[in-house]
Image (tube, helix red, strand yellow):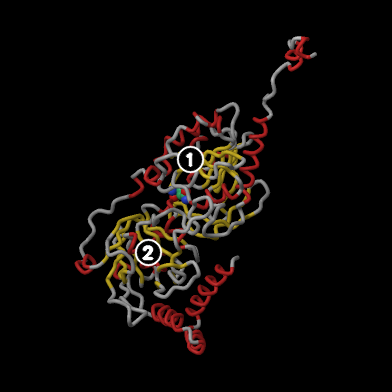
Amino acid sequence: MSAFNKAALMTCTMAMRSIARPTLVRSAFKTSGVRSLATVADTVFASSAAPKKPLAQTFSAPYQFDSEAPKAVPAALKLKSGHVFTGTSFGAPMSSFGEAVFTTSLVGYPESMTDPSYRGQILVFTQPLIGNYGVPSQEKDQFGLLKYFESNKIQCQGIVVNDYATKYSHWTAVESLGEWCAREGIPAISGVDTRAIVHLLRDQGSTLAKLEIGDEVLENKEVVEFPNPNIRNLVSEASTKEVYELNPLGDVKIALIDCGVKENILRCLVARGAAVTVFPWDYDFNQVMDQYDGLFISNGPGDPRAASKTVQNLATAFKNPAPKPIFGICMGNQLMGMAAGLDVYKLQFGNRGHNQPAVNMQNGRCSITSQNHGYALEDSVLSAPGSVVQGWEKYFVNANDGSNEGIRHLTKPFSSVQFHPEAKGGPQDTEYLFDEFLNLARAEKVKHSQKPFYVAEPLSVSKKVPAEVIA
Ligand SMILES: NC(=O)CC[C@H](N)C(=O)O
C-alpha cells in the first residue's frame, strides 16, 4: 500500500471511529488542532443521533463546514422508486439523469469518475469523506497517456457523497473536487445519508435516478420520466472513433478493441513493452490479425448486448484454425463469454469496489480485486454435462456471491476476467495477468518468426554462378 493510500485509510478509520466514540475523538482532534476533522466527527455524530424518519421523507438539512463558504445551493437525489434525498450542491448547477449505483471503494474518486464504464451512471460513494485530496492535473506520461485519470473527462452523470471535504491537500492536486465537477458540467450532492441510499439500492437493485440542483429542488416537482441509459449503445459512445497507435516500437504487437478502455489498461500494456493499436469497438479486427501477436478486449459501459458486432467478430476469431492469444477485461469478459455461447444477466446491484474476492478455479487461490460491473456471465452451463458451450471452463469465481469472474478456453490461448487486474484504483495483485497475456503473445510472435525467411536451396544458387566469375 502506498503512503498516500495509507493516509487516506487512516482518515477513513478515524472518521469511522468517530461514529462509535464521538466524545473521545472530538476532544482528541481539538487538542491536536485538526479543526476540519473535528467538524467531520461532529457531523457524523449528529446525523447518527438524529431521529429515524421514513426513507421517502428523508431530509438532510443543508449545512456548511466553513463560515466563509458561499451560500449553499440546494440539491436532491430523486430515485425512480419515489425516495428523495435532499442536501447541498457542490458541483455544476445543472440537473442530470442516470442509473444510481454505489461503490464501496475507499479511495480513487478521480479514477472512478473518469472510468468510461461509469458512463450513464450516478455514482454514490459509501466512503463518507470525499474530496479530501482534491483532483490532479491532466499531465501525460512518456507514452502520451494521462498520468492520473482513466479518460480525459468525467464520465459518470453525477456524484453523491455524505461529507464533501471543502479543504483538500495532496501533492498532485490542482483543484477541488467541486471545482472539477463544476468545470465539467457534472452535478454533485453532499449532506445526504449515503448509508440509507445504499440500503435502498442494495434491496431494490440499481435504480434510475435524477440529480436535481437549485431552483428545481425548491419547486419540488414529481419526475415523470427517468431515461434509462442502458438502452443506449454506451459502448459506441465511449469507444474511439479512430484507430491510433501507442508505443509503436514495442516488441510485441497487440490489437486492442476499445469498448471504453481505461487509461491504466493501456499503461499496463505499454509499460510491459507492447506496441498497442487501438481500434473502435465495431472494427472487424479479423481482417488485420495477421499483423498482430495478440488481441485485447477492453472494459466498457452499459449493457454488453449493445456490442453485438464485437461479439460476432469474436465468434469468428474463435473459429480461426491458427488462433492468436485473446484476453478480455470486464466488458471484455462478457463479450468473450457471449461469443463462446454464454448468456449475460444484470446483477441486482453490481459489484463496485476494491475488495472483491475472486477465486482462481485452477489453484484455489483467492485474490482481492478491483471491480466495477453491473452485468455478469451466466456460467453455470460451463460445468453442466452436455452443455452446448464446449471447450470453455470457469477461470475465476466471486467468493462473495458466486458470480462469474472469468472464463478460459481449455486448449486455445483465450481467457478473460470480470475484475480489473489494472486496478486504478484498488489492489494490483492480479496485474500478473498482463504478463501472462503478453508472454503468450510473444510466444506467438516467435512461432511466426520461425517461419522460413531464408532463401530456399542456397546450393543451387552457387551452382549457377559462371566459372570465370569465381576465378
Ligand atoms: N467495467 C466494465 O467493463 C463494466 C462492464 C459492463 N458495463 C457492466 O456494467 O457489467
Q: Is residue 254 visible?
A: yes
Q: Amino acid at mark 2?
A: Trp
User: For residue 191, what is the image quadrant?
Assistant: bottom left
The residue carrying mark 1 is 257
Observer-nearest of 106 and 258: 258
> At x 54% / y 51%, what residue is drawn?
267
Residue 64 coordinates in the image, percent (x, y)? 34, 78
Give left or right: position of 66 versus 11: left
> At x 39% / y 55%, what residue is drawn?
153
Q: For mark 2, does the 10 Å Cα neighbourhood hold few (<14), some (14 to 19), or many (20 or more) residues?
A: many
The residue carrying mark 2 is 180
Which badge, 2 or 1, comes first in the chain's sequence? 2
User: For residue 48, what is the image quadrant?
Assistant: bottom left
Label 1: state its secondary structure. strand
> At x 30% / y 59%, what residue is drawn?
210
**Contact (CB < 8 A) between labels 2 and 1?**
no
The C terminus sits in image quarter: top right
Observer-nearest of 69 and 88: 69
Please determine whether, in this image, residue 154 is positioned above or below residue 392: below
Q: Is residue 383 visible?
A: no
Please determine whether, in this image, residue 244 is positioned above or below residue 184: above
Per the rendering, the mark at residue 314 is none
For disc 1, does the CB lie below 8 Å from ligand 1?
no
For disc 2, does the CB lie below 8 Å from ligand 1?
no
Q: Amino acid at mark 1?
A: Ile
Residue 307 coordinates in the image, percent (x, y)? 42, 39
The N terminus sits in image quarter: bottom right
Q: Between marks 2 and 1, how big is the CA–CA gap?
A: 30 Å
Give left or right: position of 229 versus 393: left
Label 2: state its secondary structure. helix
Residue 206 coordinates in the image, percent (x, y)? 39, 56
